[in-house]
Image (cartoon, rainbow, N blue to C red):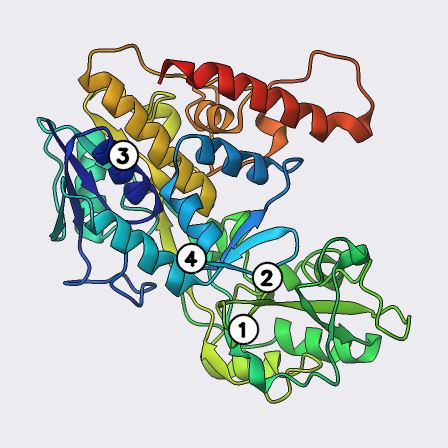
Amino acid sequence: MKVKIIGAGLAGCEAAWYLAKKGYEVELYDMKPIKRSPAHSTDNFAELVCSNSLKNDSLTNACGLLKLEMEKLGSIVMESAKLSRVEAGSCLAVDRTLFSEYITKKIKSLPNVKFISEEVKEIDPNIPTIIATGPLTSDPLCDAIKNFFGMDDFYFFDAQAPIIYADSVDYDKVYLKSRYDKGEAAYYNCPFTKEEFEIFYHELVNAEAHDFKDFEINVFEGCMPIEIMAKRGEKTLTFGPLKPVGLRKPNGESPYAVVQLRFDDASKTMFNLVGFQTHLDFPEQKRVFRLIPGLEKARFVKYGRMHKNTFINAPKILKPTYQCKDYDNIFIAGQLSGVEGYIESASSGIYAAINMDRYLQGKDPLILSRKTIMGSLSLYITDPNIKEFQPMNANFGILEDLDVAHKKVDRKELYSKRAIEAFDEEIKCL
């Protein structure tokens, strides 16, 4: 039996991997290498374009818990992430080149996966299809989706952080430390005095940005450019991405603010400026970000940039299985479906593939409960009571409330324990 998957990003690769392992003939479409989106730079599958971080790895964190759920389902993304991991403290960060190269090689090695390099411009309702084209869906396919489902424009804007060469950092000014000395120190910290921060802040909020019509009103909160965040007030930075708490300098002094640097590759030649998604002009990025202590002579591998992200109105279009309400053989997964984040996107690809398999076999769908992270995500984005839908990432706030008396300090551990037990029980049917 044949299944068509449109998009070889995280969700599409997870879906292709799962269905191919189940014995389906998979046709995996992607417009690369014939055509690339403005944010992509390689021809590999599962390319990470915004950050190399896959978020917290702890089981008392919703995203860490989601990763465990994915591993239990044989995730190719998690397999690759473990093999391409770079130091990032309690977070799972990867060498993005090794990560995508591994997934590309593994998917292409499957004999029943046929890769077709083609820009898909229409949807055929007669073919079992998983649409997983991601937030950078091409304009022709966006138009086809809007016409197919009768939707208006669907998008928000996302921003990438710049990447700098590690050998251009002044290590006499920065220091290696984890917050509160928890776990292995993996981030380099650039400490500001109050006077240094005030100069930096003034230049940041007055810097020139690219002309991007109307993007300010459509920016997703989780991807807010640093310069837009700064215009809300300097405390938005010092209580946010530049929070200095728990990051005392080696001499014991407390900095006024801190910029953190995370390795972007396994060979430790590049740093990602954590939380510094930006839409500033490239010369302005160089000028302003060199005001950060330790980065006075920073050389940029890649400047930050902003791009449009697309997503559908999931409450109107999708079932909790990622299956379209009006077309049982059409599924939409990944960030296009309305989940937000790398891991969330990948998990939806597995979930959609599971239910495509069950649909084609004539079995009842698998609908995971709100006790699990994977289930709570799909149930949230398809909740018909949501009137102004915005993308959602993994968090404990969308889980079913705990039904046992507990102390606040124990809440996350209880959520995690219950989620693991529920997930194991609910996937027994697979």
User: Is residue 313 something that shows in the picture?
Assistant: no
Q: Position of residue 417 (x, y in %)?
A: 65, 24
Say which residue appears at 40% left-offset and 16% top-offset. Answer: 367
Q: Is residue 69 above or below residue 88?
A: above
Q: From mark 1 to mark 4, how far is it between C-alphas?
A: 38 Å
- The mark lying in front, picked from 2 and 3, is 2
Distance of label 1 from label 2 (alpha carbons): 9 Å
Q: Determine the secondary structure under disc 1.
A: loop
Which residue is most to the right?
252
> Looking at the picture, how far across and down is residue 248, in whole percent?
84, 66
**Is 382 left or right of 46, judged from the image as shown?**
right
Q: Quadrant of residue 190?
A: bottom right
Instruction: Report if the CB atoms under discs 1 and 4 are less than 8 Å apart.
Output: no
Q: Residue 283 location in percent, x, y?
A: 48, 84
* Front of the two marks 2 and 4: 2
Inspect the image, locate mark 1, and give the three-letter code of the amino acid beneath it.
Answer: Lys
Work out which quarter of the rendered image holds the C terminus and state it: top left
Residue placed under numbered mark 3 in the picture:
151
Closer to the N terminus: mark 1 or mark 2? 2
Q: Earlier in the sequence, mark 2 or mark 3?
A: 2
Identified at 65% across, 78% down, the residue is 203
Instruction: Name the residue beneath numbered marker 4.
Output: 214
Helix, strand or loop under label 4: loop
Q: What residue type is disc 4 on?
A: Asp
Q: CA distance from mark 2 to mark 4?
A: 38 Å
Q: Is residue 413 visible?
A: yes
Label 3 neighbour load within 10 Å: few <14, some 14-19, many 20+:
some
| Callout 4 crowding tier (Cα within 10 Å): few <14, some 14–19, many ≥20 | few
Name the residue beneath numbered marker 1.
268
Task: State the residue in front, 49 or 198.
Answer: 49
